[in-house]
């Protein structure tokens, strides 16, 4: 995007450290599925291939570049007046993407969309059972086992139904834990 004057603000925000990363990006970084240098590279020298608008929020942009020879999409939002928000990063794959710059074929002039699509990347969401589902309530961490959910096959975002969310709240409010697990706690060093 370096050559695109419309996106000079992205490079400026990175240079000024005015960038925020979503929890989704943090999970991808911790899981080593993407790297910070890879994301920054896409944001500074990749190309914007899509811009999506919504009347309730700022437009978000899909940029494409490469990390270690693999294509990488980085979805971001913001403007010259606000922080750069990096929302999601993923490798574009079938069935959503034919190649890194081309979405899968359209049907009847419209992109194939249904309730089984990821809000963040548009990938297909398939039903799964999550072995460990972390849930925080009133500052306390609960780990639930064998939770029915949906998993985006492209970016890894997980979704649960309203019924499952209600059941989780009910379980936490009315039942004693089946077992205890030790959790590592790391304190971020403050300077």
Image (cartoon, rainbow, N blue to C red):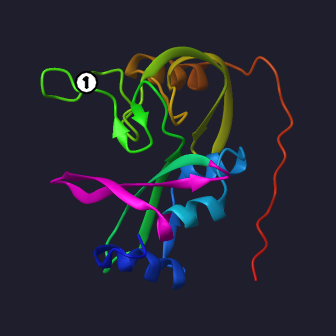
Residues rendered magenta in the picture: 43-69
x and y percentages locating residue 143 in the rendered image: 69, 29
What residue did someone put label 1 on? 112
Q: Where is residue 47, by image quadrant?
A: bottom left
Tell whether 128 sits left or right of 78: right
Residue 166 shows in the view = no
Q: Where is residue 189, by image quadrant?
A: bottom right
**For this rendering, which residue is in front, 131 or 92?**
92
x and y percentages locating residue 15 in the rendered image: 53, 83
Q: Main secondary structure of the magenta part?
A: strand
Q: On screen, 108 above or below 181?
A: above
Residue found 40% across the figure and 33% down from its top: 97
**For this rendering, which residue is in front, 128 or 107?**
107
**For this rendering, which residue is in front, 175 or 182?**
182
Q: Is residue 94 magenta?
A: no
x and y percentages locating residue 87 in the rendered image: 45, 54
Q: On screen, 40 above or below 14?
A: above
Tell whether 13 sits left or right of 102: right
Q: Quadrant of the C terminus?
A: bottom right
Q: Quadrant of the N terminus?
A: bottom left
x and y percentages locating residue 119 in the rendered image: 36, 37
Count of numbered tags: 1
Tell whether 174 sits left or right of 98: right
Q: On screen, 40 above or below 111?
A: below
**For this rendering, which residue is in front, 4 or 158?**
4
Q: Is residue 46 magenta?
A: yes
Tell whether 40 sits left or right of 8: right
Residue found 67% across the figure and 33% down from its top: 142
Residue found 28% across the figure and 75% down from its top: 6
Numbered disc 1: secondary structure: loop
């Amino acid at each position: 995007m370096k050559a695109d004057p419309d996106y000079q603000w992205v490079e400026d925000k990175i240079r000024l450290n005015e960038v925020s990363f979503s929890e989704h990006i943090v999970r991808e970084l911790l899981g080593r599925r993407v790297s910070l240098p890879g994301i920054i590279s896409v944001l500074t020298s990749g190309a914007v291939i899509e811009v999506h608008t919504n009347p309730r929020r700022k437009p978000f942009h899909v940029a494409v570049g490469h990390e270690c020879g693999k294509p990488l999409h980085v979805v971001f939002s913001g403007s010259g007046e606000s922080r750069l928000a990096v929302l999601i990063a993923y490798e574009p794959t079938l069935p959503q993407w034919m190649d890194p710059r081309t979405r899968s074929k359209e049907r009847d002039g419209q992109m194939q969309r249904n309730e089984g699509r990821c809000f963040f990347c548009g990938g297909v969401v398939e039903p799964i059972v999550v072995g460990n589902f972390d849930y925080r309530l009133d500052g306390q961490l609960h780990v639930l086992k064998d939770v029915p959910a949906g998993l985006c096959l492209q970016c890894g975002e997980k979704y649960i139904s309203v019924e499952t969310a209600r059941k989780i709240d009910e379980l936490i409010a009315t039942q004693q834990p089946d077992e205890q697990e030790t959790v590592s706690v790391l304190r971020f060093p403050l300077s």
